[in-house]
Image (spheres, rainbow, N blue to C red):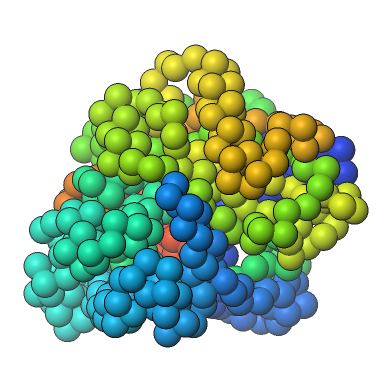
Amino acid sequence: MYEQNPDVGGKVHRIEQDGYSWGFGASLFTMPELLDELFQLCGRDPAQYYTYSRIDPVCRYFYADGTRLDAWADTERFATEVEERTGEPATKITHYLRRVAKMYEVTKDIFLFNSLHRWQTYATRTALRALANLPRIGIGGHMHQANATAFSDPRIVQLFDRYATYNGSDPYLAPATLNVISQLEYNQGAYFLQDGMPMLTRSLHRLALDMGVEFVTSCPVTAIRIEQGRATGIEAHGVFIPADIVVSNMDIVYTYRKLMPEQKAPTRYLDQPRSSSAIIFYWGMNRTFLELDLHNIFFSADYAEEFRQLSAEGNICDDPTIYLYISSKKQPAHAPAGGENWFVLINAPHDAGQDWDAVAARVRANVIARLSKELNTDIAVCIATETVNHPATIDSKTGSYLGALYGSSSNNVLAAFLRHPNFSRNIDGLYFCGGSVHPGGGVPLCLLSARIIDGIIEENNKA
C-alpha cells in the first residue's frame, strides 16, 4: 500500500498540537458492523483492536430562536422531546422514521451494498422491487419538499434537511431519497469509537500489518501503468512496482488526470458537479462547557439562504450553520485537564479560486460571535491553540479534487448512477474505492466501496 503522506489515515488521520488532539475530518461512527465484518473475515476479534459504544443523545441542536433540543437515541424519547420543545406531534416523528427504515430496506442492496454499474445487480428480485418502489420513496422530489410535507414546524424540517450535508449536497436540490441518511443515526444508532475516529484507521493499519500487508509512506504514486488494456502495476519514486491488481483510493479525477493521463477519461463521471467542502477550525479551549455535548449543531436562522449562497454563489453566508464536535467529552485525554478540543466545521463550497485565508478569517469572526452569544461567553479568549483547514488545504493534504469532501455532489436525481464505478470498463485489473466513487463519501460508504470491490474481484477470479 503506497501513501503520499507520512502517516496513513487520509481524512481520518490525527492532528496533535499543544496537548490537544483532533481527527482531521470524519467524526461520526455509524454502521460499525461493516468494520466488525472486515476483521471477522480476517479471522480476528474486533475487540482486540478497538471498542465502541452507542452515544445518547446523538446530537444537541441549538436554534437561532433560542430553542434547544436533544436528539435521543431512543426514537420514542426523541419524538417526545420534539413535541415538548417544538409542538410537532411525536407521532409525525415516529411515522417519518418508520418510513425512512422502509426506504432503507428497499434501497440498500441496490444503492449501497452492490455495484450500480453491473447488470448482475439488477438481475435479482430485490433489485426489481427497489426499482419498482423508487417513485413511492421520493426519487422524484427534493429532500426539503418531502420534509416540509412531513412536518409543520420549520425547526424539524431544518433538522432533517441537514442530512443532505452528510454527502456534501443541498437539501433544496438533492432528491428526497437521500432522507434515508437519517436511518443510520436514528434507527441503527450512532457510536463513539474509543479514542476517536483516528482509531479506525489505526486499527485497520494494525490489522493489515497482521495480515502481511506492507506499507510504504511518504511515497506518492506517480503513474498507473497500463499495457494492452490491463493494469500491470504502479510507478512511485521512479520505480515500477508490478501488480496483478491495482486499486486506487485516490480521488477519481486525480486518478485519471495525474496517474494515467494517456487513458481516455470517462467525462460523464469526472465532469459531474463537485460536492461541498468545509472550513474546519481545530480549537484547543482552555475551559469546559457543560451546556455542550459530544455532537452539537448551531443552526443558521435562514437555511434556504445559506444553501442558496453555497450552491448558487459559491459563498458562505454570514450566519452559517455550525457543527461543533468535542471528542474530549468522551475521551478526556484529547485535551489538557480543564480544557476541551473543539472541532468546528462550517459547510463551504468547493475550491473555485476563492481567497480562502480571507474567507476563513471572516467565517471565524462570525462563528465566534454566534457561539459567544449562544454560550454567553467570550469564546475568543478561551482559544488556547488553533489550526485551520479549508478547501484548498483539504485538496493539497488529502488529494480531494477541488477540496470536495465527497467527490461529486448528489444534487440531481441521477447522481447515484453518475458516480464512477468501482472498476474500469476498459482496463482489466483496475479498481476504485473511497469517497469519490460508488456508493459515496463518509466512513461506512467508503468501507462499502471496498466491500464491493472484494466481491467483484472474487467473481472475476472464479471466472
Look at 17% across and 56% down and name the residue there: 145
The part of the image, by quadrant, that contains residue 402 is: top left
Q: Is residue 31 visible?
A: no
The part of the image, by quadrant, that contains residue 24 is: top right
Left or right of residue 56: residue 419: left
Look at 73% across and 54% down and name the residue there: 289
List x then y, in percent, for residue 362: 54, 22
Q: Is residue 238 above or below residue 429?
A: above
Look at 28% across and 41% down and name the residue there: 304
List x then y, in percent, for residue 204: 67, 62
Left or right of residue 439: residue 36: right
Q: Nearer the viewer, residue 172 or 401?
A: 172
Q: Is residue 90 above or below residue 315?
A: below
The part of the image, by quadrant, that contains residue 238 is: top right
Left or right of residue 238: residue 334: right
Look at 57% across and 71% down and name the residue there: 57
Quarter of the image for the C terminus: give it: bottom left
Q: Nearer the viewer, residue 281 or 237?
A: 281
List x then y, in percent, for residue 73: 51, 77
List x then y, in percent, for residue 405: 46, 41
Q: Nearer the viewer, residue 432 or 288?
A: 288
